[in-house]
Image (cartoon, grey):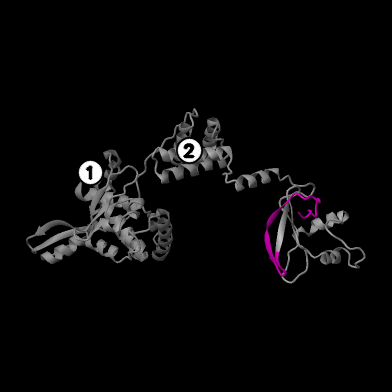
Amino acid sequence: MPECPQCHSQRVWKDGLRETARGPMQRWICRDCGYRFSETVNNAAVNAHFQPNGDTPLSFSDCPEHSERLQKLHTLILKRGADKPVFCRVGASSNGAKNLVEVETRIQEKAAGATITSPVSAMILDYAWQAKKRGLAESTIAQRVIRLRVLMKKGANLMDSDSVSTVLATSTWTDSNKHVFIVAYQSFARTFNIPWQPPKTRIERKLPFIPTEEEINQLIAGCGKKTATFLQVLKDTGARTAEAAKINWTEVDEKSCTIRVNHPVKGSLARVVKVPARTIAMINELPKTSDLVFNSNPNTIRKNFYKQRCRIARTLQNPRIRQIKLHTFRHWKATMEYHRTKNIKYVQQILGHKKLENTDLYTQLINFESDEWHVAHARNLEEESKLIEAGFEYVRYSEKDSVAIYRKRK
């Protein structure tokens, strides 16, 4: 084994090959002082650097008096065509050598195939596996693991419930944001039988932002082909993002103009929703590259949507469009359906809620003024069919003018 030029130890390991102007060069790392050096170097270059007159030949093992000057060479860069040795230091202090016992142990464990984690990190992984065996959704497990790691970064010791309570009490999080951290740690503490009295939080359920249909249509029209189709499906079905992302081609029925939501999340029910023929036509225009109509990763869909939403809001100079999220389409659908039918059970079926109290939010409607409607007239069956497909609803028949009056919210 070669000798370390810094401490002259032979406890060295190979540290990969380095491409130089003279070809590949073997790199070494010293386990005693942390020095990195090359195996094949040109001693003539060292002699020229330290002894310009060439009086005394030098080598790395025979020049301990030059160790300080050798140490200063650790920042040199080996340029192409240059005939110089290169040294580098890996985190060692200038006044002492680095203790690589811990590094050596980790490398040996990694070579043996062991997973290197701290005790608390190992418990987080164990918690994730226990939650998986209990049947929790992968998205739920991932979010809880992220929040547990955030608590650790804030200085909380997950094995000490008082430490977690202190971090929660001194944080500037809102009550709603703090609640999700409480739920995550409560699940963690229950898994490992850690006694904990969670702090009380007051969460007031806020009314969702409901845009106008015109703003939603402008947003859909300004997006790309695939994103626009996805938004149109959200608008017509009221499905969640994760539910719409898993829609299969076989679940789109062109004859009956229906879409089956067969992959509900958050404990919802599967359902069949009727959609306009235009939505089916937009879906059929997409390329069939897989069994799924859209991308199965909701995060990718959300990222693309946010980029296009910002661009459209700037173009139209309408800051309200920035408030539209993917879940806003579900709120809009529920609000409009309840306003149209006044049937809360029907809205519950559309949304797939198991409990009626989850649907009660949409009974608190915004004030629909009379000037917020588009009014249209139909003189024959063909015109009526077009208005119904466009989302208009029947109001009354005018015998004086012999026309049917339809309306649709702006």
Residue 203 image-quadrant placement:
top left
Residue 367 visible from this viewpoint: no
Report the side of 39 relative to 238 (left or right). right
Q: Tag 1: residue type?
A: Ile
Asked if residue 18 is among those painted magenta in the image, a careful observer would answer yes
Asked if residue 14 is among those painted magenta in the image, a careful observer would answer yes
Q: Where is residue 295 in the image (x, y as percent from the top left)?
A: 38, 58
- Regarding mark 2 in the picture, which secondary structure is present there? helix
Q: Position of residue 254 (x, y in %)?
A: 22, 61
Of callouts 2 and 1, the N-terminal one: 2
Give, as a single range, the part of the protein colored magenta. Answer: 1-24
Q: Is residue 385 above or below residue 353?
A: below
- Image quadrant in which the C terminus is located: bottom left
- Regarding mark 1 in the picture, which secondary structure is present there? helix
Residue 396 image-quadrant placement:
bottom left
Categorize mark 1 by other alpha carbons within 10 Å: few (<14), some (14-19), many (20+).
some
Mark nearest the camera among 2 and 1 is 2
Residue hosting label 1: 344
Report the side of 326 relative to 386 (left or right). right
Q: Residue at x 25, y 48 (%)?
A: 271
Spatial CA distance of label 2 from label 1 is: 40 Å
Residue hosting label 2: 127
Q: Where is residue 196 in the image (x, y as percent from the top left)?
A: 49, 29
Q: In this view, does 391 lie above or below 53?
A: above
Q: Tag 2: residue type?
A: Tyr
Report the side of 59 relative to 331 (left or right). right
Residue 116 visible from this viewpoint: yes
- Image quadrant in which the N terminus is located: bottom right
Report the side of 386 relative to 323 (left or right). left
Q: Which mark is residue 95?
A: none
